[in-house]
Image (tube, rainbow, N blue to C red):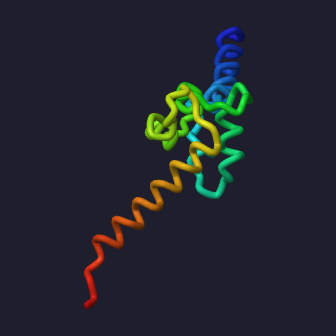
Amino acid sequence: MRLLLRTAIFALLAFPALAQAPATTAPRPTANRLEQPNVPLPERFADANSSKDGHLTRPQARASYWSYVDRNFEAMDKDRKGFVTVDDIRGFARMMREKRATEQLQAAPNKS
C-alpha cells in the first residue's frame, strides 16, 4: 500500500514538470540582413563573401540567401569571371535604375 501511495505521489509531482518541458520547435525565421535596404552594400557584400577575397561567387550568394545577386548573377558578371565584385553590383543596379527611368519617361503621356 505504501509503495502504491509513494508511486502515486511521485507521478503527481513529476507530471507538471514534464508538462512544462520546452517544446522542440524550429526557431522563427528572421529577416535576411542581406535583403534589407538599410544595410549598406559593402556590409552586405562582406557578409555574403565567406572567403573574404573580394569576389562573390554564385554559390556564396545562394548560401547567404542574397536573392538579388543570385537572380541577376549572369547580368552582373559581364566578363564571365565566375564572380562579381561590389563595383559589378553597383554598376548593374545603376544600369537598372537608368533603364526604369527611361521606361517611365517613354510611358508617360506627352503634354503638348
Q: Is residue 59 above or below residue 86?
A: above
| Residue 75 image offset from top left, x and y in percent | 45, 40
* Relative horizontal placement of residue 62, taking residue 47 as reference (left or right): left
- Residue 33 is situated, as x and y percent measured from the top left of the image, at 63, 46
Q: Quadrant of the C terminus?
A: bottom left
How many numbered tags mark residues here? Answer: 0
| In-front residue for pair 109/32 | 109
Q: Residue furthest front?
A: 79
Q: Quadrant of residue 104?
A: bottom left
The residue lying at 73 percent from left, 28 percent from top is 53
| Residue 30: quarter of image | top right
At a point 69% along the width and 8% down the height, the residue shown is: 3
| Outermost residue to the right | 52
Which residue is drawn at the image coordinates 40% and 62% (left, top)?
100
* 7 to the left or right of 75: right
**In this orientation, which residue lies closer to the viewer: 108 or 8?**
108
Quarter of the rendering occupied by the N terminus: top right
Q: Position of residue 93 (x, y in %)?
A: 52, 52
Say if 93 sits above or below 84 in the image: below
Q: Position of residue 9 (x, y in %)?
A: 69, 22
| Farthest residue, direction bottom | 112
Taking the spot 56% from the left edge, 33% from the top edge, the residue there is 61
Q: Is residue 12 left or right of residue 75?
A: right
